[in-house]
Image: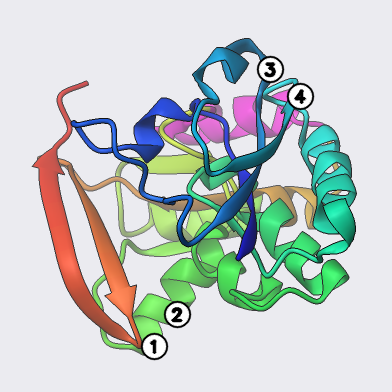
Amino acid sequence: MPVIVLDRRGYAPYHDRCGVSFLPASHYAVRLVTDITKIDQAKGPELELVVGVPGHDGAAYAEAARFLYSFGGRPAAKLITVAEQLLLPAAMLREELGITGPSLSETMLFRDKVLMKRHLRAAGIRVPDFAAFSEAAAHTLFRAHPVLIVKPRLGVGAENIFVLRSAADLAAFTASHQREVAELEAEFEVEEFINGTMYHVDSVVRKGKVIAATAGRYLG
């Protein structure tokens, strides 16, 4: 099966501790797009073609994937990624190229923090008190919560996080982000700050059921 893999970490983690590939040559012909600085990790009989691109250039990943799609006259059957930053580009490419897999609307629930929390709240799962960012929404949340967090809706990790403890902090944030109201709402969310220990949970889901999960405490 020809499979396009969009990768940012390097190809070494796609193997177990003994060096056995998770995408064995007996089952897959891997067409790899990887960070050009980590292209030396791209080794193995399952690799059909490898393209190196700048690791933070989403457009370059998309162009490479389009090139690899019909390589050798065989359209790719799957397009996958485990890189959070590439989930949405991968979904858009699947729809563009007619490859089965998670759609853009499905994938947005794993990336857009406002859509994600709305979906979880509708399922009865506790989430922080939140809203798409606006000054009015922040003032409303301040009535119930002394500390607020502003974060990019499509952010990863803890990048570009802003802590608001007062109306002055809110004014400073909006002053430093001179955009239209609709643009700020589309780019950021604001939510209550919840103090506590943070954990990261990963899972493997098959046919709607979690079949494996790992949990670990953040140390950073």
**3D distance between C-alphas at marks 3 and 1:** 42 Å
Q: Residue at x 57, y 30 (%)?
A: 8
Residue 112 inside the magenta-drawn segment: no
Instruction: Tell me the residue that label 3 is attached to.
Output: 36
Q: Are marks 4 and 3 in contact (CB under 8 Å)?
A: yes
Disc 2/disc 1 C-alpha distance (Å)? 5 Å
- Mark earlier in primary sequence (4, 3): 3
Q: Residue at x 39, y 39 (%)?
A: 14
Q: Nearer the viewer, residue 104 or 19?
A: 19
Spatial CA span between label 2 and label 3? 37 Å
Q: Earlier in the sequence, mark 2 or mark 4?
A: 4
Asked whether residue 11 is in view, the answer is yes
Q: Marks 1 and 2: in contact by CB < 8 Å?
A: yes
**How far across and down, in percent of the image, does residue 205 sit?**
31, 74
Q: Which mark is residue 119?
A: 2
Q: Amino acid at mark 2?
A: His
**Which is more foreground, mark 2 or mark 3?**
3
